Image: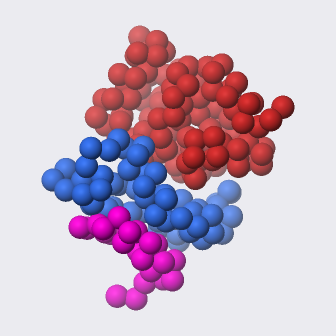
């Protein structure tokens, strides 16, 4: 399967999808760790996470998919939200929590 | 102040956004050798530009990435961005 099609399916399959370096329990990059921490602080128990370090085609493909040159990348309800800085700013302003509630993943 | 070559190159490219303020911090030393860094530098940019007025965060970051251009593929591993319009 084409990597772009695979990414489209991954993003459609779960309400919250994170492309990161490492895994939520063992992040291998401070920026990826920061996004995981923010999601957990929002009260999110579970989300889909894909480790780009395990798949070079995914690592390149996700940059092209969002036209965004860095990882991590967060998607909510199929929509690209941003990287670590944007996710942190949106958490601090409360926008992220609102988005997660709208997505039906927060009580 | 003497700046490393990459900071100078980044500063030059970001001038395309006509910044009123532009601070670039080199955090590379704190990240040297971590998994996935692939030898690239870690930089933190705070930029204030009228170009950002009325744009979303994603749009602002895309402008910064576009201005950084080829540096995002060679030399810059991570770029933390604070992008503000004047008065924010």
Side of B68 where B1 appears, left or right: left
A32 w.r.t. B38: above or below: above
Looking at the image, which residue is at 47% across and 45% down?
A84
Looking at the image, which residue is at 46% across and 16% down?
A103
Side of B75 where A85 appears, left or right: left
Q: Nearer the viewer, residue B34 or B69?
A: B69
Can you give x and y, in whole percent of width and height, for residue A33 in the image?
Answer: 54, 43
Can you give x and y, in whole percent of width and height, for residue B40 in the image?
Answer: 61, 68
The part of the image, by quadrant, that contains residue A107 is: top left
B68 w.r.t. A93: above or below: below
Q: The chain shown in blue is which?
A: B
Looking at the image, which residue is at 63% across and 64% down?
B73
B67 w.r.t. A20: above or below: below
Q: The chain shown in red is which?
A: A
Looking at the image, which residue is at 38% across and 69% down?
B16
Can you give x and y, in whole percent of width and height, for residue A16 in the image?
Answer: 55, 24
Count the labels in the image.
Answer: 0
Q: Which residues are magenta?
A: B1-24
């Amino acid at each position: 399967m084409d990597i772009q099609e695979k990414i489209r399916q991954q993003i459609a399959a779960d309400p919250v999808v994170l492309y990161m370096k490492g895994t939520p329990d063992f992040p291998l990059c401070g920026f990826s760790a920061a996004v995981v921490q923010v999601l957990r602080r929002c009260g999110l128990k579970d989300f889909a996470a894909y480790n780009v370090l395990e798949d070079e085609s995914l690592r390149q493909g996700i940059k092209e998919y969002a036209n965004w040159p860095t990882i991590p990348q967060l998607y909510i309800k199929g929509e690209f939200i941003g990287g670590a800085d944007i996710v942190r700013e949106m958490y601090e302003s409360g926008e992220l929590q609102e988005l997660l509630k709208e997505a039906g993943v927060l009580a | 102040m003497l700046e490393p070559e990459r900071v100078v190159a980044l500063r030059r490219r970001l001038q395309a956004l006509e910044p009123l303020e532009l601070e670039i911090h080199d955090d590379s030393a704190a990240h040297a050798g971590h998994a996935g860094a692939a030898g690239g530098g870690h930089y933190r940019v705070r930029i204030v530009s009228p170009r950002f007025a009325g744009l979303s965060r994603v749009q602002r970051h895309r402008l910064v990435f576009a201005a950084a251009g080829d540096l995002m593929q060679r030399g810059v591993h991570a770029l933390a961005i604070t992008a503000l319009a004047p008065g924010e």
